[in-house]
Image (cartoon, rainbow, N blue to C red):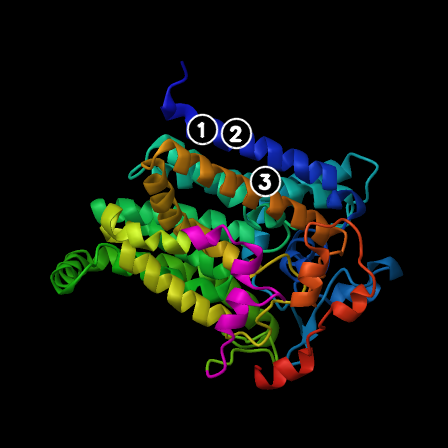
Amino acid sequence: MIKTTIYPKISIFLIVIVAGWYGIQVAKWRTNEIINHDVVSYYAYLPAAFIYHDLSFEFKSGLPDDFEGRIWTHSAKNGNQVLKMTMGNSLLWTPFFLAAHGYAHVSEYQSDGYSLPYSIAIFIAGLFYLAIGLIFLNKTLKNYFNDLTIALVLILLVFGTNLLHYAVIEPGMSHVYSFCLFNVFLFITIKWNRNPSWSNSLKLGLLTGLIILVRPSNIIVVLVPLLWGVAGVKSFKAKLQIFFKNRYRIISAVFVALIVFCLQIIYWKSVTGDLFYYSYGDEGFFFLHPHVIDGLFSYRKGWLIYTPVMLFALFGFRYLRKQIPDSFWPVLIFLIINIYLVFSWWCWWYGGSFGSRIMVDSYAFLSLPLAAVIQKISEKRRIMRSIFIIIFGTLVWVNLFQMRQYRTSLLHWDSMSRKAYWGIFLKSYFPEKYQEMLDPPDYEEARGRGK
């Protein structure tokens, strides 16, 4: 008889194998579609630094015509060319890039940073960081939940959400890396609150720096360790005493985080002349005009429309307070602020994407209320458990089906409407007058007014 303690480990192994197989079948890396669109701005640091040795991108003028669209830069005030995205993804890709570059040198592929080995390297990196994220999520959940609950949570997070898509289909985007870092960060947060040692403090600082370097708006992740264990006035005062007692360790964590982010500051200073540089131009947040309802429920990209399994995570807050009281307020407050923040962005649907990709990062924290509700379901009668298993299975199937629809453009990348959604629901073909069902967004209006 198999011991239940190995269920999560088996689940992680099988999840990674199946996810890798799925990614190989879709094989966007074969046609070099991974280093494309926004990914070129995350990635260009690597070929610029290791191949062309020029982070000012003056080498662009000497590139052949087939490099058109491979490197996106814009002019800073001093006239120099600068990348839009921060370098966090490139930093995490570095060992994979170097391995690909070495292979390209001894093979028939061009060692220009954009041939097939480099796309394969990013695909492998996405799978690797997915695995690391799941391993640490398992370590976290084992503190509170039984192994069957954990196994189901891992399966639902990968196959019931858009995490799978951004791990193996579009692994060049930042989300699977943030998911991984968030999971390690959550694990170390719990360790620090149990033992605020120098080691745990420095690890938190390192992870904070990396998280911000991958996606600066994710700086709000620091709310979780700051509020962990706070459930009322008494516990808040106790938390302040812990902070004061360990103030030098906390300062050291902040210092390490700043050192990590200084990599970006050094780049900005050397290229633009400014220590801090806003690379998004006229793109920004409209905090007085957030699109929270649209972001959650719109047929264009509504998070809960395209990832309905997360409704169970939201409902799980009802049980989280009792099962893991230390986590209730930090996770809830993070979620509320994060939703407000990300859906205040001018392009609240985040361009072409499968579902609300911006929410993938936070799945690490949402795994806690999701596990809480699943554990509660496991205590129900067999008939109720069977009903929920059918529901979860159906949600996984629908998610995978819609992923296929998205890859074939049946599910439109940015123009879905209520009529279009139900017109293609569970269909593999385009209905008549499909184009008339779509509702293309007005990017210029959104950029100008945030509405």
Pick whichever, 69 or 180, lies toward us: 180
Task: From the top left corner, tell me how far across and down residue 319 is, in percent.
Answer: 29, 50
Compared to 259, does 187 lie above or below?
above
| Residue 92 part of the magenta segment | no
Range of magenta residues: 288-312
| Residue 293 part of the magenta segment | yes
For label 3, the residue is: 127
Mark drawn on residue 9: 1
Q: Which amino acid does label 2 sit on?
A: Phe
Compared to 214, does 61 lie above or below?
below
Pick whichever, 139 or 355, lies toward us: 355
Mark drawn on residue 448: none
At 53% from the left and 66% from the top, the residue drawn is 297
Distance of label 3 from label 2 (alpha carbons): 12 Å
Distance of label 2 from label 1 (alpha carbons): 6 Å
Q: What residue type is labelled 3?
A: Leu
Distance of label 3 from label 1 (alpha carbons): 16 Å
At 61% from the left and 46% from the top, the residue drawn is 398
Compared to 352, does 101 lie above or below?
above
Mark drawn on residue 13: 2
Which is closer to the viewer, label 3 or label 1? 1
Relative side of 274 to 234, left or right:
right
- The quarter of the rendered structure image containing the C terminus is bottom right
Do tag 2 and tag 1 residues touch (Cβ < 8 Å)? yes
